Image (spheres, rainbow, N blue to C red):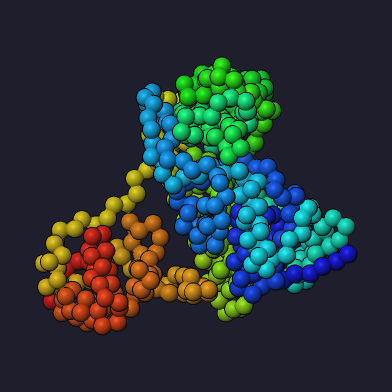
């Protein structure tokens, strides 16, 4: 048996489903190849409040809200010091990943993607202008291939670590009383840290994150190390005494990494096939979906706009570079907050990347005074051609850059910035510039853009 598709997506996790759904809606013929039958078990059940805009953009927000998952309002935390605190996480969610991923897969199917499951895809072969994948008792040919196979990274290639090697030791616990308020728990220990949450079916997931060397020093016995770490904690030590029983303890790699070549003219890597972030962020799912949506825009342009192919490739690479850097800096900052074990190797290695970002230029002139002055950009700022998503396509647009900006800014509030800044040399004052902008922008938008620029020191007085 043989089949064909324009695009083959290998893996039906959040990234693969987001990619497939978006491309199918853009009119592409998409086939998803998934080796497991859904719903299938998976760890990584925590969604931060920041997941909702991403789920809504994908089109599954309402279905996830109605699925009966566990809403979280607070987390019980021991992190900065030995004190136990309650952290606000209103809007967070603990999901059954089997049911959650099934929602995403059904959404992709409803958008028009075909699903081949269970069907294990063997290493693909490139033949002329198409790919061939052996899938069970047949083969699938595709013009474009998307690797959404997670840490299996079916396409191979270098994916160097972006942080210290990390192991996750995890187990599911059953039989005890539900945690009070169903709160997530997070605790820092000298040799690592713990995370736990109540699952929708009443079970508990508890995970210990450690250096591989800690497991080697324990004789390689992951079960014994896992229970020793939990017993040494304050937030998890009462699991066994209160009647909870752990299933088999499993170990998996939780090291961060990034693919060296995430996209080219015939393939793309998404989700953990592209890069992996530190689990401390609890944002792996929405990050995976974001890579799928960004990759869909790039792939759409590669396949439909030959002239924009390089811009599309550059756009997706820049998206991943920004995500990797942002998540690494955020994680390093969180690790640096833990003081009691700051000199322990586990914490020292992970907080080493924490460094202050370049600050904004000092704002020395009030905006009311600047309204009467001729203004321009500071010397460190510039407008540079940057690949940008415009509707459903990627185009080169001039974007504002500055060392304090974490990425170039081409649009503010949906309005293109460069044409507005081009007018500054031709007007006598900022007030005149705002008047000009008001003629072409929605009411109030011109003033809001001026305030945004001024607050960041990106408007400075110029000699007349």
Can residue 145 be seen in the rendering of this structure? no
Q: Position of residue 315 (x, y in %)?
A: 51, 66
Task: Say whether residue 236 is left or right of residue 401.
Answer: right
All told, the count of numbered labels is 0
Q: Residue at x 55, y 19 (%)?
A: 242
If the image is split into quadrants, where does the N terminus sit? bottom right
Q: Which one is nearer the viewer's eye here, 381 or 409?
A: 409
Left or right of residue 280: residue 382: left
State the residue at coordinates (56%, 56%): 63
Viewport quadrant of the C terminus: bottom left
102 or 418: nearer the viewer: 102
Q: Nearer the viewer, residue 216 or 241?
A: 241
Q: Residue furthest top?
A: 241
* 410 in relation to 247, above or below: below
Residue 50 on image: x %, y %: 45, 51
Measured as percent of width and height from the top left, residue 354 is found at 40, 41
Residue 9 coordinates in the image, percent (x, y): 69, 61
Of the pair 308 and 150, the residue shown nearer to us: 150
Q: Residue at x 66, y 73 (%)?
A: 28
Residue 86 can be seen, yes or no: yes
Residue occupying the point 84% across, 62% down: 139
The answer to whether 371 is drawn above or below residue 158 in the figure is below
């Amino acid at each position: 048996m043989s089949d064909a598709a324009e695009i083959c997506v290998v893996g039906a996790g959040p990234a693969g489903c987001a990619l497939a759904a978006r491309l199918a809606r853009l009119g592409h013929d998409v086939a998803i190849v998934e080796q497991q039958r859904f719903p299938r078990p998976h760890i990584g059940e925590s969604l931060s409040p920041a997941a909702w805009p991403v789920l809504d953009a994908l089109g599954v927000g309402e279905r996830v809200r109605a699925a009966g998952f566990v809403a979280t309002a607070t987390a019980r935390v021991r992190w900065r010091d030995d004190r136990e605190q309650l952290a606000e996480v209103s809007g967070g969610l603990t999901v059954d990943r089997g049911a959650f991923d099934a929602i995403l897969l059904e959404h992709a199917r409803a958008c028009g993607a075909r699903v081949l499951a269970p069907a294990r895809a063997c290493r693909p072969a490139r033949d002329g202008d198409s790919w061939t994948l052996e899938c069970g008792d047949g083969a699938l040919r595709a013009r474009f291939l998307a690797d959404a196979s997670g840490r299996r990274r079916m396409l191979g290639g270098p994916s160097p670590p972006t942080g210290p090697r990390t192991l996750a030791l995890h187990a599911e616990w059953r039989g005890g009383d539900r945690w009070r308020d169903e709160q997530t728990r997070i605790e820092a220990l000298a040799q690592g840290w713990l995370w736990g949450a109540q699952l929708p079916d009443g079970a508990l997931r508890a995970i210990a994150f450690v250096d591989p060397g800690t497991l080697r020093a324990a004789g390689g016995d992951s079960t014994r190390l896992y229970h020793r770490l939990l017993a040494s904690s304050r937030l998890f030590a009462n699991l066994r005494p209160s009647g909870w029983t752990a299933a088999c303890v499993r170990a998996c790699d939780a090291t961060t990494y990034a693919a060296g070549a995430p996209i080219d003219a015939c393939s793309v890597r998404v989700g953990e096939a592209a890069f992996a972030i530190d689990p401390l962020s609890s944002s792996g799912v929405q990050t995976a979906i974001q890579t799928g949506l960004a990759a869909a825009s790039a792939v759409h342009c590669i396949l439909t706009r030959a002239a924009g192919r390089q811009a599309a490739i550059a756009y997706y690479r820049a998206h991943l570079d920004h995500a990797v850097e942002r998540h690494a800096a955020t994680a390093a900052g969180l690790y640096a907050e833990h003081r009691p074990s700051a000199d322990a190797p586990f914490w020292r290695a992970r907080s080493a990347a924490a460094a202050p970002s370049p600050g904004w230029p000092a704002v020395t002139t009030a905006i009311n005074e600047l309204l009467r002055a001729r203004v321009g950009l500071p010397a460190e700022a510039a407008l540079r051609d940057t690949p940008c998503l415009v509707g459903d396509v990627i185009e080169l647009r001039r974007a504002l850059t500055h060392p304090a900006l974490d990425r170039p800014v081409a649009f503010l509030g949906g309005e293109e910035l460069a044409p507005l800044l081009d007018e500054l040399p031709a007007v006598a004052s900022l007030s005149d510039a705002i008047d000009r902008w008001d003629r072409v922008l929605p009411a109030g938008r011109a003033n809001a853009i001026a305030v945004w620029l001024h607050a960041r020191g990106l408007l400075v007085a110029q000699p007349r």
